[in-house]
């Protein structure tokens, strides 16, 4: 299993890193669009586990919607899309998660299918905006989410005693979540001080927020980003458990599916994109 995970990770990095560092921006946009399309395919399969044949049509419709927004929407329309997406994560998802495993999937599958056609493209626009501003900003937002996950894993292993959401994800603990937040805060402080003026790390997410909104603003924004990354992870876990599956798919051997890899990013990216738009 470990060998499979390592091989898959090497292959993904072998594709992603050259496109990120050396290819024109349009190629990165195409690559992320492919990921979004595959995630849409998995999204449908979670919502309609007994009607998976239409997942291809749904994925194509999501891609078509992304292209339509790209061709016809101006920046103000994209901002509205990001705000609506953020509203979904802040207002609708907590209500859904409150129902835990008693969620009536039959009642929610079509609304969530419709919503998915917009929240997934919204992540594409947020990512591309972050990358258009700078490589450092793009990577620092990804590092924030990855650090929250890594910190939560190791802190949970070492100190986890109190379950964060026992029914949705038994392996997650309150101590783990706090450990993830502390690790991100350490990185945030370093990013806003030691690395704020370094040629390769200036303009990182933490430094930009601190320079615009001060230390209190940076701490609050970082806490919100970490909390939403955890929310994205737990929400996908809920969807998988309600659908009765372990992974969103088997597209990534040893890792599950694309949604399993980007679930924590889905709520954070629109938030980060809007914050940068407001701070700039």
Image: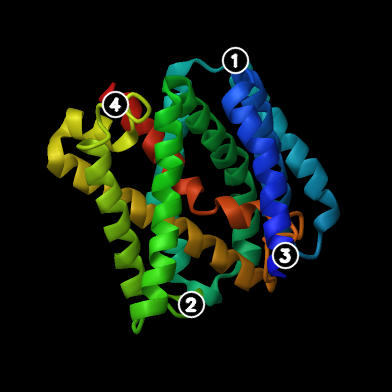
Please provide percent x and percent y for residue 122. Answer: 53, 34
Q: Nearer the viewer, residue 253 or 220?
A: 253
Q: Are marks 1 and 4 in contact (CB under 8 Å)?
A: no
The quarter of the picture where residue 183 lies is bottom left
Nearest to N terminus: mark 4 or mark 2: 2
Residue at the spot of label 4: 278
Q: Are marks 3 and 2 in contact (CB under 8 Å)?
A: no
Packing grade of label 4 (10 A; few <14, some 14-19, many >=20) is few
Q: Secondary structure at mark 3?
A: helix
Residue at the spot of label 2: 171
- Residue 18: mark in rendering: none
The quarter of the picture where residue 63 lies is top right
Between label 1 and label 2, give the one nearer the viewer. 2
Image side of residue 81 versus residue 62, left or right: left
Report the Cα–Cα distance between label 3 and label 2.
Answer: 23 Å
Report the Cα–Cα distance between label 3 and label 4.
Answer: 44 Å
Residue at the spot of label 3: 3
Between label 3 and label 2, give the one nearer the viewer. 3
Q: Secondary structure at mark 2?
A: strand
Q: Residue at coordinates 73% horizontally, 48% vertically from top-left?
A: 41
Report the Cα–Cα distance between label 4 and label 2.
Answer: 36 Å
**Is residue 98 shown to the viewer in this render?**
yes
Q: Nearer the viewer, residue 112 or 1?
A: 1
Between label 3 and label 4, give the one nearer the viewer. 3
Please provide percent x and percent y for residue 171. Answer: 48, 77
Please provide percent x and percent y for residue 96. Answer: 47, 63
Nearest to N terminus: mark 3 or mark 1: 3
Q: Residue at coordinates 76% horizontally, 54% vertically from top-left?
A: 251
Please provide percent x and percent y for residue 191. Answer: 27, 39
Q: Residue at coordinates 18% horizontally, 29% vertically from top-left?
A: 211
Nearest to N terminus: mark 1 or mark 4: 1
Q: Nearer the viewer, residue 174 or 115?
A: 174
């Amino acid at each position: 299993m470990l060998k499979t995970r390592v091989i898959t990770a090497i292959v993904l990095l072998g594709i992603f890193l050259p496109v990120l560092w050396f290819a024109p921006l349009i190629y990165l946009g195409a690559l992320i669009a492919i990921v979004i399309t595959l995630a849409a395919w998995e999204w449908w399969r979670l919502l309609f586990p007994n009607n998976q044949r239409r997942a291809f049509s749904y994925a194509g419709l999501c891609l078509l919607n992304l292209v339509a927004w790209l061709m016809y929407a101006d920046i103000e329309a994209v901002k509205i899309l990001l705000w609506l997406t953020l509203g979904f994560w802040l207002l609708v998802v907590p209500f859904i998660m409150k129902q835990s495993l008693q969620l009536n999937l039959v009642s929610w599958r079509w609304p969530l299918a419709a919503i998915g056609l917009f929240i997934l493209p919204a992540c594409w626009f947020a990512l591309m905006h972050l990358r258009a501003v700078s490589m450092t900003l793009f990577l620092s937002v990804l590092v924030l989410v990855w650090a929250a996950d890594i910190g939560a894993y190791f802190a949970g292993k070492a100190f986890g005693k109190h379950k964060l959401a026992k029914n949705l994800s038994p392996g997650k603990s309150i101590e783990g979540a706090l450990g993830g937040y502390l690790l991100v805060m350490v990185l945030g402080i370093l990013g806003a001080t030691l690395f704020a003026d370094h040629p390769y790390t200036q303009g990182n997410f933490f430094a930009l927020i601190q320079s615009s909104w001060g230390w209190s603003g940076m701490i609050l924004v970082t806490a919100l980003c970490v909390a939403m990354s955890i929310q994205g992870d737990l929400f996908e876990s809920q969807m998988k458990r309600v659908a009765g599956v372990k992974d969103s798919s088997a597209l990534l051997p040893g890792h599950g599916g694309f949604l399993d890899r980007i679930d924590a990013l889905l709520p954070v990216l629109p938030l980060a994109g809007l914050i940068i738009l407001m701070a700039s």
